[in-house]
Image (cartoon, rainbow, N blue to C red):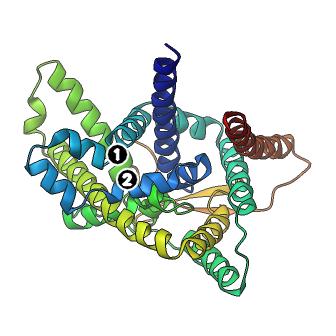
Amino acid sequence: MPESLHTIGSKLALILKGLAMGAANKVPGVSGGVVAFVAGFYEEFIYSLQRFNLKAVKLLLNFRLISFWKYINGRFLSLLILGMLISYFSISKLLDYLILHFELYVWAAFFGMILGSLYVIAKDFNTWNIRTISLIILGIGVGVFISLLEPARENDNLLFVFFCGIIGVSGMTLPGLSGSFILILLGNYVLLLVDSVNALYDTAGEIFQGNFNFTEDPVRIRLINVLFFFSVGSLAGLISLSHLLGYVLKKYKAETFAVIIGFITGSLGVVWPWKYKIFKTDQNQNILIDAQGNYVLDNYNRYIPDFDLASTRWALLYIVTGILIVVGLEWYGDYRKKKLT
Protein backbone atom coordinates (compact mmCIF):
# COMPACT_ATOMS: atom_id res chain seq x y z
CA MET A 1 0.00 0.00 0.00
CA PRO A 2 2.73 2.57 0.88
CA GLU A 3 4.43 1.83 -2.45
CA SER A 4 1.21 2.47 -4.39
CA LEU A 5 0.62 5.69 -2.45
CA HIS A 6 4.17 6.74 -3.24
CA THR A 7 3.57 6.02 -6.94
CA ILE A 8 0.34 8.04 -6.93
CA GLY A 9 2.10 10.87 -5.11
CA SER A 10 4.96 10.94 -7.61
CA LYS A 11 2.49 11.02 -10.51
CA LEU A 12 0.55 13.90 -8.94
CA ALA A 13 3.82 15.73 -8.31
CA LEU A 14 4.72 15.47 -12.01
CA ILE A 15 1.28 16.72 -13.06
CA LEU A 16 1.61 19.67 -10.65
CA LYS A 17 5.04 20.48 -12.09
CA GLY A 18 3.48 20.46 -15.55
CA LEU A 19 0.71 22.76 -14.28
CA ALA A 20 3.32 25.20 -12.99
CA MET A 21 5.35 25.08 -16.22
CA GLY A 22 2.28 25.61 -18.41
CA ALA A 23 0.96 28.48 -16.32
CA ALA A 24 4.35 30.19 -16.17
CA ASN A 25 4.97 29.84 -19.88
CA LYS A 26 1.71 31.59 -20.78
CA VAL A 27 2.51 34.71 -18.75
CA PRO A 28 4.59 37.29 -20.69
CA GLY A 29 7.97 37.64 -19.01
CA VAL A 30 7.86 34.35 -17.12
CA SER A 31 9.63 31.20 -18.32
CA GLY A 32 8.36 27.67 -17.82
CA GLY A 33 11.97 26.54 -18.04
CA VAL A 34 12.71 28.40 -14.80
CA VAL A 35 10.11 26.22 -13.06
CA ALA A 36 11.80 23.09 -14.40
CA PHE A 37 15.21 24.42 -13.41
CA VAL A 38 14.27 25.35 -9.84
CA ALA A 39 12.15 22.23 -9.29
CA GLY A 40 15.15 20.09 -10.22
CA PHE A 41 13.87 18.23 -13.28
CA TYR A 42 15.22 20.47 -16.05
CA GLU A 43 17.98 18.10 -17.19
CA GLU A 44 15.67 15.06 -17.13
CA PHE A 45 13.13 17.04 -19.17
CA ILE A 46 15.73 17.96 -21.81
CA TYR A 47 17.26 14.48 -21.99
CA SER A 48 13.81 12.86 -22.23
CA LEU A 49 12.90 15.07 -25.19
CA GLN A 50 16.23 14.11 -26.75
CA ARG A 51 15.02 10.51 -26.92
CA PHE A 52 12.75 11.45 -29.82
CA ASN A 53 15.30 10.34 -32.37
CA LEU A 54 15.85 7.75 -35.10
CA LYS A 55 15.95 4.88 -32.61
CA ALA A 56 12.57 5.92 -31.20
CA VAL A 57 11.11 6.03 -34.72
CA LYS A 58 12.41 2.51 -35.43
CA LEU A 59 10.89 1.17 -32.21
CA LEU A 60 7.57 2.77 -33.08
CA LEU A 61 7.55 1.49 -36.68
CA ASN A 62 8.32 -2.03 -35.44
CA PHE A 63 5.37 -1.76 -33.00
CA ARG A 64 7.66 -2.26 -30.00
CA LEU A 65 5.43 0.10 -28.06
CA ILE A 66 6.55 -0.83 -24.55
CA SER A 67 10.20 -0.43 -25.49
CA PHE A 68 9.37 2.86 -27.20
CA TRP A 69 7.53 4.11 -24.09
CA LYS A 70 10.42 3.24 -21.79
CA TYR A 71 13.02 4.62 -24.18
CA ILE A 72 11.41 8.09 -24.39
CA ASN A 73 10.74 8.17 -20.63
CA GLY A 74 7.04 8.19 -21.51
CA ARG A 75 5.68 8.17 -17.96
CA PHE A 76 7.62 11.30 -17.04
CA LEU A 77 6.85 13.21 -20.25
CA SER A 78 3.17 12.21 -20.48
CA LEU A 79 2.35 13.30 -16.93
CA LEU A 80 4.29 16.53 -17.33
CA ILE A 81 2.54 17.34 -20.62
CA LEU A 82 -0.84 16.40 -19.11
CA GLY A 83 -0.22 19.00 -16.41
CA MET A 84 0.69 21.59 -19.05
CA LEU A 85 -2.52 20.90 -21.01
CA ILE A 86 -4.67 21.12 -17.87
CA SER A 87 -2.93 24.36 -17.00
CA TYR A 88 -3.60 25.79 -20.45
CA PHE A 89 -7.37 25.61 -19.92
CA SER A 90 -7.59 26.08 -16.14
CA ILE A 91 -4.78 27.64 -14.09
CA SER A 92 -3.79 29.92 -16.94
CA LYS A 93 -7.39 31.19 -16.99
CA LEU A 94 -7.05 31.98 -13.28
CA LEU A 95 -3.81 33.80 -14.01
CA ASP A 96 -5.53 35.80 -16.73
CA TYR A 97 -8.17 36.85 -14.18
CA LEU A 98 -5.61 37.75 -11.52
CA ILE A 99 -3.50 39.77 -13.95
CA LEU A 100 -6.62 41.62 -15.09
CA HIS A 101 -7.74 42.55 -11.55
CA PHE A 102 -4.53 42.46 -9.46
CA GLU A 103 -1.84 43.09 -12.05
CA LEU A 104 0.70 44.88 -9.85
CA TYR A 105 0.65 42.18 -7.17
CA VAL A 106 0.84 39.31 -9.67
CA TRP A 107 3.88 40.83 -11.38
CA ALA A 108 5.41 41.52 -7.95
CA ALA A 109 4.99 37.86 -6.96
CA PHE A 110 6.55 36.72 -10.25
CA PHE A 111 9.42 39.18 -9.79
CA GLY A 112 10.06 37.76 -6.33
CA MET A 113 9.90 34.18 -7.61
CA ILE A 114 12.49 34.91 -10.28
CA LEU A 115 14.74 36.58 -7.70
CA GLY A 116 14.35 33.48 -5.55
CA SER A 117 15.09 31.30 -8.56
CA LEU A 118 18.32 33.20 -9.18
CA TYR A 119 19.42 32.52 -5.60
CA VAL A 120 18.56 28.81 -5.87
CA ILE A 121 20.42 28.40 -9.16
CA ALA A 122 23.44 30.55 -8.28
CA LYS A 123 24.06 29.04 -4.83
CA ASP A 124 24.99 25.66 -6.35
CA PHE A 125 27.02 27.21 -9.15
CA ASN A 126 30.69 26.95 -8.17
CA THR A 127 32.50 27.40 -11.50
CA TRP A 128 33.37 31.06 -11.22
CA ASN A 129 36.05 32.13 -13.67
CA ILE A 130 36.57 34.75 -16.39
CA ARG A 131 34.84 32.56 -18.98
CA THR A 132 31.66 31.90 -16.98
CA ILE A 133 31.45 35.49 -15.67
CA SER A 134 31.74 36.76 -19.27
CA LEU A 135 28.93 34.39 -20.30
CA ILE A 136 26.76 35.61 -17.41
CA ILE A 137 27.28 39.21 -18.57
CA LEU A 138 26.47 38.14 -22.14
CA GLY A 139 23.26 36.44 -20.95
CA ILE A 140 22.23 39.56 -19.03
CA GLY A 141 22.84 41.70 -22.12
CA VAL A 142 20.76 39.45 -24.37
CA GLY A 143 17.93 39.34 -21.81
CA VAL A 144 17.85 43.14 -21.48
CA PHE A 145 18.07 43.59 -25.26
CA ILE A 146 15.06 41.31 -25.84
CA SER A 147 13.02 43.18 -23.21
CA LEU A 148 13.61 46.50 -25.02
CA LEU A 149 12.63 45.34 -28.53
CA GLU A 150 9.60 46.87 -30.23
CA PRO A 151 6.79 44.36 -30.97
CA ALA A 152 5.80 43.60 -34.57
CA ARG A 153 2.29 43.48 -36.08
CA GLU A 154 0.09 40.37 -36.13
CA ASN A 155 0.86 37.93 -38.96
CA ASP A 156 -1.22 34.79 -39.62
CA ASN A 157 0.92 33.43 -42.46
CA LEU A 158 1.08 29.69 -41.67
CA LEU A 159 4.82 29.41 -42.27
CA PHE A 160 5.42 32.32 -39.91
CA VAL A 161 3.00 30.74 -37.40
CA PHE A 162 5.05 27.51 -37.57
CA PHE A 163 8.18 29.57 -36.83
CA CYS A 164 6.33 31.22 -33.92
CA GLY A 165 5.66 27.73 -32.53
CA ILE A 166 9.38 26.93 -32.55
CA ILE A 167 10.22 30.24 -30.86
CA GLY A 168 7.22 30.28 -28.52
CA VAL A 169 8.09 26.94 -26.95
CA SER A 170 11.60 28.17 -26.18
CA GLY A 171 10.45 29.25 -22.71
CA MET A 172 9.97 25.58 -21.85
CA THR A 173 13.55 24.67 -22.73
CA LEU A 174 15.48 27.89 -22.07
CA PRO A 175 15.13 29.17 -18.48
CA GLY A 176 14.81 32.96 -18.44
CA LEU A 177 13.51 33.25 -22.00
CA SER A 178 9.77 33.91 -21.93
CA GLY A 179 8.16 32.29 -24.97
CA SER A 180 4.97 34.29 -24.53
CA PHE A 181 6.91 37.56 -24.38
CA ILE A 182 8.72 36.59 -27.59
CA LEU A 183 5.29 36.03 -29.17
CA ILE A 184 4.32 39.57 -28.12
CA LEU A 185 7.47 40.85 -29.85
CA LEU A 186 6.55 38.84 -32.95
CA GLY A 187 3.05 40.36 -32.81
CA ASN A 188 1.21 37.03 -32.48
CA TYR A 189 0.57 36.57 -28.75
CA VAL A 190 -3.18 37.28 -28.93
CA LEU A 191 -3.63 35.30 -32.16
CA LEU A 192 -1.81 32.18 -30.92
CA LEU A 193 -2.43 32.07 -27.18
CA VAL A 194 -5.89 33.67 -26.98
CA ASP A 195 -7.91 33.73 -30.20
CA SER A 196 -6.90 30.33 -31.60
CA VAL A 197 -7.18 28.58 -28.22
CA ASN A 198 -10.65 30.05 -27.66
CA ALA A 199 -11.60 28.92 -31.17
CA LEU A 200 -10.55 25.36 -30.35
CA TYR A 201 -12.41 25.48 -27.03
CA ASP A 202 -15.61 26.73 -28.74
CA THR A 203 -15.28 24.17 -31.55
CA ALA A 204 -14.82 21.29 -29.13
CA GLY A 205 -17.95 22.38 -27.24
CA GLU A 206 -19.99 22.59 -30.44
CA ILE A 207 -18.80 19.17 -31.65
CA PHE A 208 -19.76 17.68 -28.28
CA GLN A 209 -23.28 19.10 -28.79
CA GLY A 210 -23.42 17.71 -32.34
CA ASN A 211 -23.19 21.15 -33.93
CA PHE A 212 -20.88 21.31 -36.99
CA ASN A 213 -21.81 24.78 -38.23
CA PHE A 214 -18.26 25.94 -37.54
CA THR A 215 -17.21 24.25 -40.82
CA GLU A 216 -18.94 27.12 -42.63
CA ASP A 217 -17.19 29.80 -40.58
CA PRO A 218 -13.99 30.88 -42.42
CA VAL A 219 -12.67 32.78 -39.38
CA ARG A 220 -13.02 29.70 -37.16
CA ILE A 221 -11.38 27.44 -39.74
CA ARG A 222 -8.52 29.93 -40.14
CA LEU A 223 -7.93 30.03 -36.38
CA ILE A 224 -7.95 26.22 -36.11
CA ASN A 225 -5.41 26.02 -38.97
CA VAL A 226 -3.30 28.61 -37.19
CA LEU A 227 -3.40 26.62 -33.93
CA PHE A 228 -2.50 23.39 -35.78
CA PHE A 229 0.60 24.90 -37.43
CA PHE A 230 1.57 26.59 -34.15
CA SER A 231 1.28 23.25 -32.30
CA VAL A 232 3.36 21.42 -34.93
CA GLY A 233 5.98 24.17 -34.74
CA SER A 234 6.00 23.92 -30.93
CA LEU A 235 6.56 20.16 -31.11
CA ALA A 236 9.37 20.63 -33.64
CA GLY A 237 10.89 23.31 -31.43
CA LEU A 238 10.74 21.16 -28.29
CA ILE A 239 12.51 18.25 -29.97
CA SER A 240 15.10 20.28 -31.91
CA LEU A 241 15.99 22.60 -29.02
CA SER A 242 16.23 19.67 -26.62
CA HIS A 243 18.83 17.99 -28.86
CA LEU A 244 20.84 21.20 -29.02
CA LEU A 245 20.59 21.84 -25.28
CA GLY A 246 21.30 18.20 -24.43
CA TYR A 247 24.54 18.46 -26.37
CA VAL A 248 25.69 21.71 -24.77
CA LEU A 249 24.67 20.52 -21.27
CA LYS A 250 26.80 17.44 -21.77
CA LYS A 251 29.81 19.23 -23.25
CA TYR A 252 29.59 22.68 -21.64
CA LYS A 253 27.48 22.33 -18.49
CA ALA A 254 29.11 25.14 -16.48
CA GLU A 255 29.02 27.52 -19.44
CA THR A 256 25.36 26.69 -20.16
CA PHE A 257 24.38 27.34 -16.54
CA ALA A 258 26.30 30.63 -16.63
CA VAL A 259 24.33 31.81 -19.68
CA ILE A 260 21.07 30.72 -18.01
CA ILE A 261 21.91 32.67 -14.84
CA GLY A 262 22.65 35.76 -16.93
CA PHE A 263 19.56 35.28 -19.06
CA ILE A 264 17.27 35.02 -16.04
CA THR A 265 18.89 38.13 -14.54
CA GLY A 266 18.38 40.05 -17.77
CA SER A 267 14.73 38.98 -17.95
CA LEU A 268 13.95 40.68 -14.63
CA GLY A 269 13.23 43.89 -16.54
CA VAL A 270 10.40 42.15 -18.39
CA VAL A 271 8.58 41.26 -15.14
CA TRP A 272 9.30 44.55 -13.34
CA PRO A 273 5.99 45.10 -11.48
CA TRP A 274 5.73 48.87 -11.89
CA LYS A 275 4.85 49.58 -15.52
CA TYR A 276 2.18 51.11 -17.71
CA LYS A 277 0.69 49.26 -20.65
CA ILE A 278 1.22 50.64 -24.14
CA PHE A 279 -1.45 49.49 -26.59
CA LYS A 280 -1.16 49.04 -30.36
CA THR A 281 -2.76 51.68 -32.56
CA ASP A 282 -3.61 51.94 -36.23
CA GLN A 283 -2.50 54.69 -38.62
CA ASN A 284 -5.19 57.01 -37.20
CA GLN A 285 -3.94 56.41 -33.65
CA ASN A 286 -7.05 54.40 -32.72
CA ILE A 287 -6.35 51.62 -30.22
CA LEU A 288 -6.59 48.19 -31.86
CA ILE A 289 -9.10 45.69 -30.44
CA ASP A 290 -8.87 41.90 -30.76
CA ALA A 291 -11.69 39.45 -31.53
CA GLN A 292 -12.67 39.31 -27.84
CA GLY A 293 -13.01 43.10 -27.58
CA ASN A 294 -9.74 43.54 -25.63
CA TYR A 295 -7.14 46.20 -26.35
CA VAL A 296 -4.08 44.76 -28.13
CA LEU A 297 -0.96 45.07 -25.95
CA ASP A 298 2.12 46.58 -27.59
CA ASN A 299 4.69 46.97 -24.80
CA TYR A 300 5.26 48.38 -21.30
CA ASN A 301 6.59 51.68 -19.97
CA ARG A 302 8.43 50.96 -16.71
CA TYR A 303 8.86 53.43 -13.83
CA ILE A 304 10.25 53.73 -10.29
CA PRO A 305 7.43 53.30 -7.72
CA ASP A 306 6.35 55.79 -5.09
CA PHE A 307 7.26 54.11 -1.79
CA ASP A 308 4.75 56.25 0.12
CA LEU A 309 1.85 54.44 -1.58
CA ALA A 310 0.20 51.52 0.21
CA SER A 311 0.03 49.60 -3.08
CA THR A 312 3.83 49.82 -3.39
CA ARG A 313 4.33 48.42 0.11
CA TRP A 314 1.91 45.58 -0.65
CA ALA A 315 3.77 44.85 -3.87
CA LEU A 316 7.06 44.69 -1.95
CA LEU A 317 5.42 42.22 0.42
CA TYR A 318 4.40 40.06 -2.56
CA ILE A 319 7.98 40.22 -3.87
CA VAL A 320 9.25 38.92 -0.53
CA THR A 321 6.52 36.26 -0.56
CA GLY A 322 7.57 35.15 -4.05
CA ILE A 323 11.19 34.84 -2.92
CA LEU A 324 10.20 32.85 0.17
CA ILE A 325 8.03 30.46 -1.86
CA VAL A 326 10.87 29.47 -4.19
CA VAL A 327 13.58 29.40 -1.52
CA GLY A 328 11.23 27.55 0.87
CA LEU A 329 10.55 24.87 -1.74
CA GLU A 330 14.29 24.51 -2.29
CA TRP A 331 14.93 24.15 1.45
CA TYR A 332 12.13 21.60 1.72
CA GLY A 333 13.56 19.64 -1.21
CA ASP A 334 17.01 19.57 0.41
CA TYR A 335 15.45 18.48 3.71
CA ARG A 336 13.59 15.62 2.00
CA LYS A 337 16.76 14.46 0.24
CA LYS A 338 18.72 14.41 3.52
CA LYS A 339 15.90 12.59 5.26
CA LEU A 340 15.72 9.89 2.56
CA THR A 341 19.50 9.38 2.65
x and y percent of residue 224 in the render? 20, 45
Identify the residue at image location x=66%, y=37%: 102
Asked whether the residues under the numbered discs 2 and 1 touch, taking CB atoms below 8 Å apart as contact, a structural biologist would say yes
Q: Earlier in the sequence, mark 2 or mark 1?
A: 2
Q: Secondary structure at mark 2?
A: helix
Is residue 295 toward the left or the right of residue 38 in the image? left
Nearest the eye: 244 or 233 = 244
Query: Would you name the residue on which mark 2 appears?
Result: 48
Identify the residue at image location x=15%, y=51%: 59
Residue 181 in sight in this render: yes
Q: Which mark is residue 73?
A: 1
Q: Name the outermost residue toward the top.
A: 1
Mark 1 neighbour density, 10 Å: few (under 14) some (14–19) many (20 or more) = some
Q: Amino acid at mark 1?
A: Asn
Above/below status of 6 relative to 224: above
Identify the residue at image location x=22%, y=47%: 223
Q: Secondary structure at mark 1?
A: loop
Is residue 33 toward the left or the right of residue 267 in the image? left
Above/below status of 3 relative to 200: above
Identify the residue at image location x=17%, y=50%: 225
x and y percent of residue 312 in the render? 82, 46
Nearest the eye: 272 or 215 = 272
Nearest the eye: 51 or 196 = 51
Is residue 292 toward the left or the right of residue 44 in the image? left
x and y percent of residue 184 in the render? 45, 60
Residue 287 in sight in this render: no
x and y percent of residue 134 in the render? 67, 84
Image quadrant for the C terminus? top right
